[in-house]
Image: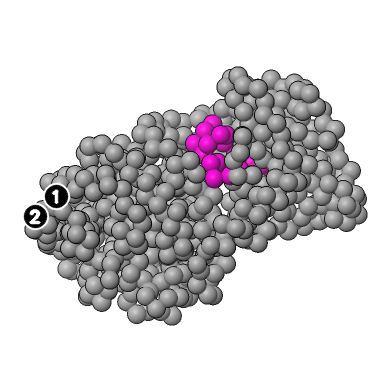
Amino acid sequence: MRIEDLAIIGDTQTLAVVGKDGGVHWLCLPRFDSQACFSSLLGGKEHGCWTIAPKEVTRVERRYRKDSLVLETDFVTPTGTVRVTDAMPVRGEAPDVVRVVEGLSGSVEVCVELVIRFDYGRTVPWVRKLDVRLCAVAGPNALVLATPAELHGQDLTTVGRLAIHRGDRVPFTLTWYRSHEAPPRSPDPYVSIDETDRTWRKWTARCQGHAPYCDDIARSLLTLKALTYAPTGGVVAAGTTSLPEAIGGVRNWDYRYCWLRDAAFSLYAMLHAGYHEEAAAWRDWLLRAIAGAPKDLQIMYGPAGERYLDERTLDWLPGYEDSRPVRIGNAAATQLQLDVYGEVLDTFHQARRFGVPTDPDSWPLQRAIADWLESSWQQPDEGLWEIRGPRRDFTFSKVMAWVGMDRVVKAVEQHQMEGPVDRWRRAREAICRDVCEKGWDAERNTFTQSYGSRDLDASLLLIPTVGFLKPHDPRVIGTVAAIERELVRDGFVLRYPTSEGPNIDGLRGSEGAFLACSFWLVDAYVLTGRRKEAWRLFERLLAVRNDLGLMSEEYDVQRKRLVGNFPQAFSHVALVNSARALTTDEGAAQLRKET
């Protein structure tokens, strides 16, 4: 299945990936980063899948209920039409997946296949009857299935055939629990779906969108909420691992963690849409996760702030369309990225600007981060994109170091915080001089990816957005023009140059155009007065979403396909911020910098 064929349902602690074929192809329980019990997304049915669908289908139509994360998929067959409604109720006693098959017309034979494989498709569970339910156990994990349908075991699979007539409804409820505990009760499936629908619609009603993109903004914010780990407020980058950045390639990473890089962008999107509680929860997660010595700051953490994200490969999974290896964990967590220090300080700055109540312990931590950054910004690092090669003086890393010093200076100037503001001002000025002297290529009239390099980087589009230079500065205009010449493919933006041979990031092979970077070009167009081009590119970006309004990380301009992990928080946050830049008088000039 193409990534465009995927949908998600979620309970704000994990999510399930559902295909157009009626299969649940990915599900980690009980958290986003837990082991998967359905892993066919990265392999085959034998690695775990739960399919409810007719055998002979002539057409598939699907939709989310309006302003909701309840999914409806209609299967049209030669003998009639059935609907499968999928939902994950907001977490109660235990995580549940609720599925209901409903006859809309005629009579249709529907096939049910339940293949449970714990440990990312490796472990076959012990399955037995439990009262009137079916129970599957392996190690610490257990699932219980409640349904009135007649099912039986066949070749390590639970199967059944249902004759569904117009008006029939057959429910299925799958519930996870710890195998050493008593199985929880299975909720009423019909009540669960209705309550889930009401919960999402109530949340979406708070959204402050901007015409003509109100629905687009709402859907992207719903997706962002679905990627939020409710107990802590952390936002994971995506709900999947190892969906490739290039089909058949090796750029397959685990994105089920919380990146500090995303913090300020996400906070801004939430605050301007009216979701102050969610923004405060994200800010508080950030404060807890980074507590400690500034030198130990990581670029990402687990959903509850976990630091150990050891990377390993799962050799028994062949990968999405043979894209190997399949990885879990992420070794990039140990990298030095100077930009995250600026992102963290900017996040607290944005929260102050919008009146989010402050934690009295947060300012001493910000001061400590600023002091470390003041003495350490000259260090080379791995950069925004987690380059797995030698450390370099990445231009954008230095720009974000400037942002960090700028935000603490403004904390003193505008919010009456206490600190060595004169010293911080001098550091800010020194960083600015350093970037403008060493990161600038006068011959080509552009900033470059790193000092002394001729390569470009799409992150340089953010220079005016974060306030480092004015939008109409000739250096900004020149950099935008250079990126258009060298990094744009069919209108979409690459992160940096790649080829089939060894690349600057230490990996072989190319990757798709990065959707967030393409939205950054929209913002750059707005800032530099090129609004018609901004509108045109924004509409093209909306068109690459799937039929449900969901986006992955990247877009393959040759294959015309979405690639990368799905759904991608960074892409949806960038959409929200670009929509606001295009539709408000304030515009993109205020995306990340103060008035």
Residue nearest the observer in this picture, 178 or 434: 178
Q: Please, what is the three-letter code of the amino acid marked with disc 2?
A: Arg
**Mark positioned earlier in the residue sequence (1 or 2):** 1
Residue at the spot 12% in from the left edge and 46% down from the top edge: 375
Residue at the image point whose x is 59% and y is 25% from the top? 178
Residue 390 spot, x, y in % from top left? 24, 42
Instruction: Please name which of the two marks, 1 or 2, marks the residue nearer to the observer.
Output: 2
Q: Which residues are magenta?
A: 11-35
Rendering quarter of residue 435: bottom left
> What SS does tag 1 mark?
helix
Q: Which residue is mark 1?
A: 374
Image quarter where the C terminus lies is bottom left
**Label 1–label 2 contact, CB within 8 A:** yes
Q: Is residue 80 left or right of residue 346?
A: right
- Residue type pointed to by label 1: Glu
The residues tagged by marks 1 and 2 sit, at their Cα atoms, a distance apart of 9 Å
Q: Name which residue lies at 19% across and 56% down.
A: 417
Q: Quadrant of residue 452?
A: bottom left
Q: Is there any visible trace of residue 370 in the rendered image?
A: yes
57 is higher (above) or lower (below) than 66: above
Nearest to the observer: residue 75 or residue 262: 262
> Helix, strand or loop at disc 2?
helix
Which residue is identified by label 2? 423
Q: Position of residue 52 (x, y in %)?
A: 76, 42
